[in-house]
């Protein structure tokens, strides 16, 4: 085991020690402890970047604009397109009932149906 003389107090200590055991002065012949740190930090940054990229490139399951257009054409079709078949059927019946009852409530319900089709997270069904 190599011995080095402490530059602070002159005590001979192991060259492998990070600091002088007597005065705690950092061992100048032991700089190898620090160059590891930037490497591991860079690795961590890379992992974060990969995670962000994966989230950004996640494909959309459905298009909100297309869902709204489909529900404007046929009430509830946008909901059915999003995979909400029961929801779409309910909207279809509500809007048709609204049109039969009076034209204006039907139009309002139809608009609500189209807006509802646009809502939600396009990344999940
Ligand atoms: Zn010392």
Image (spheres, rainbow, N blue to C red):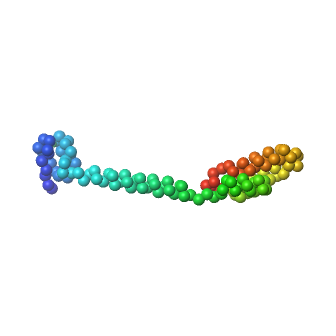
Q: Position of residue 34 (x, y in %)?
A: 28, 50
Q: Position of residue 94 (x, y in %)?
A: 81, 49
Residue 79 seen anywhere in this rendered image of the structure: no
Residue plotted at (79% across, 46% down)? 109
Tell which of 96 and 33 is nearer to you.
96
Work out which quarter of the rendered image holds the C terminus and state it. Answer: bottom right
Work out which quarter of the rendered image holds the N terminus and state it. Answer: bottom left
Residue 77 seen anywhere in this rendered image of the structure: yes
How many numbered markers are drawn? 0
Residue 23, located in which quarter of the rendered image? top left
Q: Position of residue 82 (x, y in %)?
A: 69, 56
Seen in the image, is 111 located left or right of residue 56? right
Residue 69, located in which quarter of the rendered image? bottom right
Residue plotted at (23% across, 51% down)? 31
Residue plotted at (74% across, 50% down)? 114
Q: Position of residue 64 (x, y in %)?
A: 67, 53
Residue plotted at (56% across, 58% down)? 58
Tell which of 13 and 72 is nearer to you.
72
Residue, far right: 101
Seen in the image, is 70 located left or right of residue 20? right
Seen in the image, is 70 located left or right of residue 30? right
Seen in the image, is 106 located left or right of residue 8? right
Residue 76, located in which quarter of the rendered image? bottom right
């Amino acid at each position: 085991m190599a011995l080095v003389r402490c530059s602070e107090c002159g005590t001979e200590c192991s060259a492998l020690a990070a600091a002088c055991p007597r005065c705690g002065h950092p061992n100048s012949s032991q700089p190898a402890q620090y160059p590891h740190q930037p490497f591991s930090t860079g690795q961590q940054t890379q992992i974060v970047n990969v995670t962000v990229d994966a989230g950004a490139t996640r494909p959309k399951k459905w298009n909100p604009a297309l869902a709204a257009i489909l529900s404007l054409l046929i009430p509830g079709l946008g909901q059915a397109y999003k995979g909400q078949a029961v929801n779409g059927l309910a909207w279809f019946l509500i809007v048709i009932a609204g049109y039969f009852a009076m034209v204006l409530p039907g139009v309002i319900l139809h608009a609500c149906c189209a807006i509802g089709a646009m809502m939600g997270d396009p990344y999940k069904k």
